[in-house]
Amino acid sequence: MTVVSSTPVSPGLKNIKTIRDFEITGKTIFLRLDLNVPLEKGQITDETRITAALPTVKYCLEKGAKLIIASHLGRPKSADDKQYSMEPVAKRLGELLDVEVVLMEEPSSEGVKHILYGHMRNQIICLENLRFDEGEVENRTDLAQSWAAYTDIYINDAFGACHRAHASIHALPELMQQKGIGFLIEKEIKMLDSLTDHPKKPFIAILGGAKVSDKIPVIEKLINVVDGFVIGGAMAYTFLKAQGIPVGKSLVEADKVKYAKEMIQRMEARDKTLLLPVDHITSTSFNDVTHMRLNPSVGIAENEMGLDIGPQTIKNYVACLSKAETIFWNGPMGVFETKEFSKGTFAVAETLAKNPGTKIVGGGDSAAAAVQSGYADKMTHISTGGGASLEYLQGEKLPGLEILRP
């Protein structure tokens, strides 16, 4: 029996089935998740990706499916890198779901078949770190065949890994007749599509972080859609440099100054907003808080560098963002990891939290900033995709999605 989904299909998911489209009761599901969580001395320090995966996992359990969960964790060089074991993740999953999670020591272990034979209802099989087997990154068919041998339905819910052509993302679904996505990928694509498919206006994109070069594809994708850009972080100094403003020792991409100048002109020609810092929190070096000071002017002295936006810039940005109906945030306003240089980034997070419109956060640093600010639960959506979310937004085809289309 095929279950017909009543949920509107997002443009990016055309011809891709969701887990709702399958009769999964009693079936063995290979569920690829992104459980690549940060660990410190074996302890999970941020379980956002685990909690984001729970709706799909719970759906499978409620429907009585036999569930095999698979994920990578970090970048181990071999199976001997036990610091990257999935053991703490499997343990936490068991606690959150109140089920038994059986961790298989080898990703391609034959033991999975034996456990499936005596499978109990409240039991999940969790494969050990997929990257413990070199065949994962090499996208090897023989590894995928070992999984396909006991899999009825393949479900990908690892949006953060969809831009990688790895065995669990590409080779395995290539072998499967029944394949689709989980609830998390469905939500991720729906949210990202909403930014380019008739977003509510005004639409403002906040771009920060270190490099203009990292943001050029996003800028080019959004420049005709947004009503304005708000620029912060180190990349702002390349734009100020393009205007002939002294930026001292601030990080500047010299080879992108020309692009920044052209973008300023293009925004002016389109009569769109482009906000840049008008004051700064500066110091003499990246980690020096002893010489931190407020620089009330646009220009920065030769022996100083900008490490956060200043209070007047914050006011300007808040005024703009408070009126927006749609906001996309990618990149912090300063070195927010250091308390003294975090005010600009956290002010942006607070402003988004108070805005009743659509607020989508993309990129690892922005997501971390939203969490650290305490306003994460006030965002419409915080992407777990990292690089995948930016590549998708830029219009690139993701191997993990394309392989799921007929």
Image (cartoon, rainbow, N blue to C red):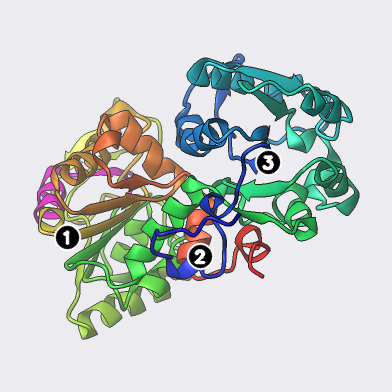
Quadrant containing the C terminus is bottom right
Which residue is denoted by mark 1 in the rendering?
325
How far apart are labels 3 and 2 at the CA level?
A: 21 Å
Q: Is residue 285 visible?
A: no
Q: Which residues are magenta?
A: 302-319
**What is the quadrant of residue 107 in the picture?**
top right
Which residue is at 17% across, 80% downward?
271
Which residue is denoted by mark 3 in the rendering?
29
Which residue is denoted by mark 2 in the rendering?
13
Counting residues from the N terminus, which is met first, the one under dot 3 or under dot 2? 2
Between 207 and 145, the residue placed more toward the observer is 145
**Left or right: where 17 falls relative to 209:** right
Vertical comparison of 4 with 102: above or below: below
Counting residues from the N terminus, which is met first, the one under dot 3 or under dot 1? 3
How far apart are labels 3 and 1 at the CA level?
A: 40 Å
Estimate the x, y position of residue 227 in percent, counting from the top left. Answer: 21, 71
Counting residues from the N terminus, which is met first, the one under dot 1 or under dot 2? 2
Which residue is at 16% across, 67% downward?
202
For numbered disc 1, what is the local secondary structure? loop
At label 1, the amino acid type is Glu
For numbered disc 3, what is the local secondary structure? strand
**Left or right: where 346 falls relative to 185:** left
Give the number of the mark in front: 1 or 2.
Answer: 2
Between 347 and 221, the residue placed more toward the observer is 221
